[in-house]
Image (tube, rainbow, N blue to C red):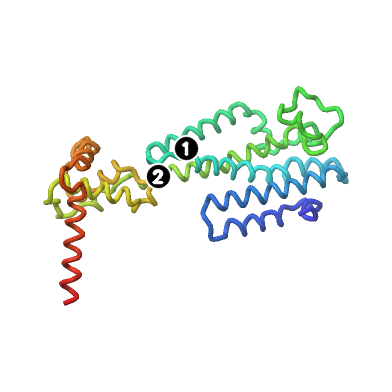
Amino acid sequence: MITAIKNNSLVDFEHELAQILNSNTSEVEKAKKIIIFIDNILLQLTDWLKTHTFDSIQDEIKFFKEIKPNIVAKLIFYKELLFLVATLPVEKNKKVKHYEKKLEAIRHFNRKNREFIKYIKSQSTHFDELYFSRKMYRDLFLTDCIIINHDAKLCTSHDFLVAEVLAYELLTLHIENRIDNLNQSCTINSNQLQSNLHWTAKKIDLIELIYALHEAKVFDNGQADIKEITNVFEKAFQIDLGENITRSFIDIKNRKTEPKRFIYQLLYALDDKIESDMK
């Protein structure tokens, strides 16, 4: 990693990152591994920066304006991603609101730092020495409070801000894609659900089945909302199950005989079919 830094290159870093991303693990596990990986890289950077002297002010600016922020941006992104997943609601409509809340926070950040973001996006350089070089006497009025507690050898006044800008760009794209996917999955194509099938058993039986399927977590890895499942069954079988299926489920639980009456009926019917076919 240190050799790559000396060559003003992120090749080694990106290669290691790609290996983790291409591994056959869950999104959460990948994020955790990447966070640990980048933390280790930054520890190496810390030791290196304490003793390293850049050959020129241009090399120092390049490092703190481009190389280090790109590494830190990935750390911010995957920590934010991990937090988003950990706090994600179950219901799809609440998921969208959860993501939109984060997007609004990012927009607030962008508004607050509008002029600096414009400086970075326009590839301006006139303040580079002030923003991205380490000076013994820096103007603390231009320095983020987060920097004051850091060793002056390890950072400049604005390298972390660049990392945040880069990270929030990645996060915005990621969240917008997630919202698009959720909206597409929530949009039920009526043509796909058109059929000549009608539910001819009791409504309460279908509600019992829906609750069984929901509790078995057979839809969307258990993330599907009971109302969404109900809506699909109503459209598929052209039946109205009413506004309050929760009330109907309470009636199911309060049955004096067997609460799981319809489920057992299905089980017995399947057993009879299997036994009949085996004869």
Residue 185 is situated, as x and y percent measured from the top left of the image, at 36, 47
Crowdedness near tag 2: few (<14), some (14–19) or many (≥20) residues, C-alpha within 10 Å: some
Q: What residue type is disc 1 on?
A: Tyr
Say which of 56 and 259 sits in front: 259
Residue 235 seen anywhere in this rendered image of the structure: no
118 sits left or right of 197 in the view: right
Q: Residue at 25% across / 48% down in the picture?
A: 210
Where 144 sits versus 7, above or below? above
Q: Quadrant of residue 163?
A: top right
Q: Could you tell me which secondary element the residue under label 1 belongs to?
A: helix
Say which of 238 and 275 sits in front: 275
Q: What residue type is disc 2 on?
A: Leu
Name the quadrant of the C terminus: bottom left
Residue 129 seen anywhere in this rendered image of the structure: yes
Inter-mark Cα distance, 2 to 1: 11 Å
Q: Residue at 76% across / 41% down in the picture?
A: 64
What residue sits right under mark 2 in the picture?
Answer: 182
Q: Could you tell me which secondary element the residue under label 2 belongs to?
A: helix
Q: Earlier in the sequence, mark 2 or mark 1?
A: 1
Q: Which mark is residue 99?
A: 1
Residue at the outermost front position = 256
143 sits left or right of 222 in the view: right
Name the quadrant of the N terminus: bottom right
91 sits left or right of 82 in the view: left
Q: Which mark is residue 177?
A: none
Tell me, yes or no, whether the two marked residues, 2 and 1, touch with CB atoms within 8 Å: yes
Residue at the outermost bottom position = 279
94 sits left or right of 268 in the view: right
